[in-house]
């Protein structure tokens, strides 16, 4: 049922924004070395339309439409967005890789293009990646203590001034993460006022429900207006 709904949403979304998706790729590659705004977005678990995912594409195009006269570069975080939940160690490693890739991109932009305003975002698993990336540090459960040395350190404090906004769609709740044996996500104080969150009321991944497979509402962020609303808020902070 959920897979059929996702396919239906994807088909409708891509039919209406297929040209926009192609434009995203071509404009990002043709953009000047230092754009006015740079979006770094991590897709959700096994989400179609990699590397941004359909939620990321929807958000990026909404953002682009509200930046007339300003350039926008776009990066989809290069990580597997794995659905390998049966192997928690391997799955955790892919998330850590995503966090590291996100942080590397943010610091690279801040270093080479100090006037570029950075927007960090993610959906579902990607929201965890984005939120870990701007956290004050990740504290692993005791059972994973042997992997502590693999956890990326927090972003350099100076980078915070380059980040205009952090946009999180359907971030797994603290209860969901605890049930899954994952570290609860915290946002560094430097980014808290810049963070915008979206959770559909009945989405059991982010609404505080116990660990379970996603409800049908979990796949609707690209089409329910949240990405457009998020883009409006981000533009107001640039």
Image: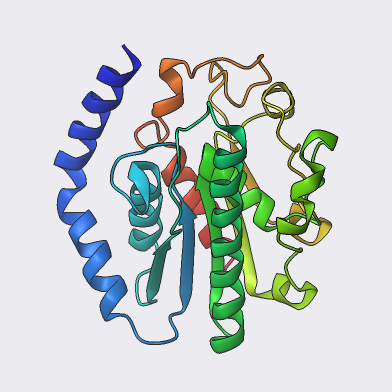
Decide: is 185 above or below 199.
Answer: below
Decide: is 57 above or below 91.
Answer: below
Q: How many marks?
A: 0
Q: Position of residue 93 (x, y in %)?
A: 59, 48
Q: Quadrant of the N terminus?
A: top left
Q: Quadrant of the C terminus?
A: bottom right
Q: Is residue 62 left or right of residue 179?
A: left
The answer to which of 151 and 66 lies nearer the viewer is 151
Q: Position of residue 85 (x, y in %)?
A: 52, 29
The answer to which of 103 and 141 lies nearer the viewer is 141
| Furthest residue in direction top, as rendered | 1
Decide: is 59 above or below 38.
Answer: above
Q: How is the image coloured?
A: rainbow
Q: Position of residue 117 (x, y in %)?
A: 56, 74
Query: Which image quadrant is residue 223 in?
Result: top left
Q: Give the residue displayed 47% in from the left and 55% down from the top.
A: 41
Q: Position of residue 182 (x, y in %)?
A: 70, 34
Query: Which image quadrant is residue 118 in?
Result: bottom right
Q: Give the residue displayed 68% in from the left and 29% down from the top.
A: 173
Q: Give the residue displayed 50% in from the left and 17% down from the top.
A: 213
């Amino acid at each position: 049922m959920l897979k059929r709904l996702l396919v239906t949403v994807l088909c409708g979304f891509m039919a209406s924004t297929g040209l926009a998706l192609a434009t995203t790729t071509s404009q990002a590659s043709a953009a000047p070395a230092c754009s006015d705004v740079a979006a770094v977005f991590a897709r959700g678990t096994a989400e179609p339309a990699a590397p941004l995912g359909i939620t990321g594409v929807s958000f990026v195009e909404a953002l682009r439409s509200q930046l007339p006269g300003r350039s926008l570069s776009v990066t989809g975080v290069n990580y597997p967005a794995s659905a390998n939940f049966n192997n928690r160690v391997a799955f955790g490693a892919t998330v850590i890789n995503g966090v590291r890739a996100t942080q590397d991109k943010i610091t690279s932009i801040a270093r080479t293009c100090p006037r570029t305003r950075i927007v960090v975002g993610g959906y579902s698993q990607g929201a965890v990646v984005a939120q870990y990336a701007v956290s004050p540090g990740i504290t692993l459960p005791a059972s994973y203590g042997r992997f502590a040395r693999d956890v990326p350190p927090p972003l350099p404090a100076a980078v915070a001034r380059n980040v205009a906004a952090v946009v999180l769609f359907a971030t797994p709740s603290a209860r969901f993460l605890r049930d899954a044996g994952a570290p609860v996500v915290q946002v560094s104080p430097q980014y808290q006022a810049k963070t915008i969150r979206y959770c559909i009321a009945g989405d059991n991944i982010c609404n505080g429900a116990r660990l379970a497979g996603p409800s049908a509402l979990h796949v609707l962020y690209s089409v329910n207006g949240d990405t457009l609303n998020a883009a409006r808020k981000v533009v107001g902070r640039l």
